[in-house]
């Protein structure tokens, strides 16, 4: 659960006006005439004492000899604010158990009803996976091929099947190392210059093929030739071969 509205428990109250106190603490409008009516109308009832951690909640009770019922404000630490006394200061009980004992001692035993995600129809907490209500408007964005959302299932597959942190040493010792960076960048920059444009996403297959073909210790001359021709075309590839031959002193 996450908190939609954080209440202020330290506000004045009137003895017996429990629903008014909880409404004012959360700052929500009054709708019903009693705690019993508000509980009956709620569509977010939770009957067990399965209080979610870290949030403020309204907790509802039946009250002996009083059909109006009772509602209290439960804090994230489990303590409770209630209009239990004949004063204008809410009573801060250390727990629901102590609250119930307090009322029983004075001959007005409480009957636990449950907790809700709303107060008189206004949501005050919501499931963490739910939709968050916000003020203002939300502009919808359109995803493109270059900016696609990755589903949770895809992310899980990637994590399980692709590179992990433990693969780092293997990569560094077997494949490209940090010192190879300048060499790779030089090759790619030369290809980019000959193409007259910056390499883009569509060129990825050629680049990957080229780099895979020239892994240290696993050079595949034929694959390099195929990748170069595919990337820059036959004419430019011929110029590259001629230039490389000259630089290497080949006949």
Image (cartoon, rainbow, N blue to C red):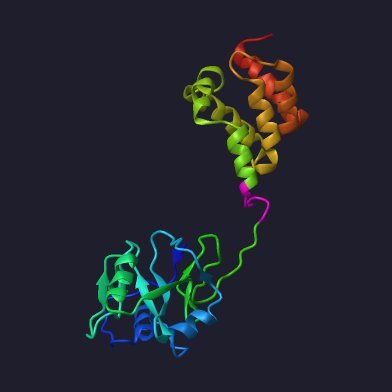
Dividing the picture into quadrants, the one containing residue 94 is bottom left
Dividing the picture into quadrants, the one containing residue 8 is bottom left
Residue 249 in the figure: left or right of residue 173: right
Residue 59 in the figure: left or right of residue 133: left
Q: Position of residue 66 (x, y in %)?
A: 40, 86
Query: Compared with residue 133, is residue 175 higher up or lower down, i.e. above or below?
Result: above
Residue 138 in the figure: left or right of residue 110: right
Q: Nearer the viewer, residue 235 or 100?
A: 100
Residue at image coords 71%, 33%:
231
Q: Position of residue 213 (x, y in %)?
A: 67, 21
Query: Compared with residue 140, is residue 193 higher up or lower down, i.e. above or below?
Result: above
Q: Nearer the viewer, residue 64 or 84?
A: 64
**The magenta segment:** 144-152
Q: Position of residue 88 (x, y in %)?
A: 23, 85
In magenta stretch: residue 151: yes
Q: Nearer the viewer, residue 177 or 101?
A: 101
Q: Main secondary structure of the magenta part?
A: loop
In magenta stretch: residue 21: no
Q: Position of residue 23 (x, y in %)?
A: 39, 82
Pick the quarter of the image with the C terminus: top right
Residue at image coords 70%, 32%:
206
Q: Residue furthest right?
A: 234
């Amino acid at each position: 659960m996450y908190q939609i509205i954080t209440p202020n428990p330290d506000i004045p109250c009137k003895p017996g006006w429990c629903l008014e106190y909880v409404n004012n603490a959360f700052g929500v409008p009054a709708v019903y005439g009693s705690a019993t009516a508000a509980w009956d109308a709620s569509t977010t009832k939770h009957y067990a004492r399965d209080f979610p951690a870290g949030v403020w909640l309204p907790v509802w009770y039946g009250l002996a000899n009083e059909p109006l019922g009772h509602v209290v404000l439960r804090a994230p630490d489990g303590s409770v604010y209630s209009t239990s006394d004949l004063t204008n200061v809410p009573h801060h009980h250390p727990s629901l158990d102590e609250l119930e004992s307090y009322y029983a001692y004075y001959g007005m035993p409480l009957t636990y009803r449950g907790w809700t995600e709303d107060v008189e129809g206004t949501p005050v907490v919501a499931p963490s996976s739910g939709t968050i209500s916000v003020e203002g408007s939300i502009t919808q964005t359109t995803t493109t091929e270059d900016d696609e959302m990755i589903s949770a299932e895809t992310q899980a597959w990637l994590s399980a099947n692709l590179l992990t942190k433990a693969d780092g040493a293997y990569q560094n010792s077997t494949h490209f190392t940090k010192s190879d960076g300048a060499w790779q960048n030089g090759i790619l920059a030369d290809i980019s210059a000959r193409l007259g444009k910056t390499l883009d996403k569509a060129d990825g297959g050629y680049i990957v093929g080229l780099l895979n073909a020239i892994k240290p210790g696993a050079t595949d001359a034929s694959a390099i030739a195929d990748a170069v021709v595919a990337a820059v075309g036959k004419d430019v590839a011929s110029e590259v071969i001629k230039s490389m031959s000259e630089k290497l002193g080949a006949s």
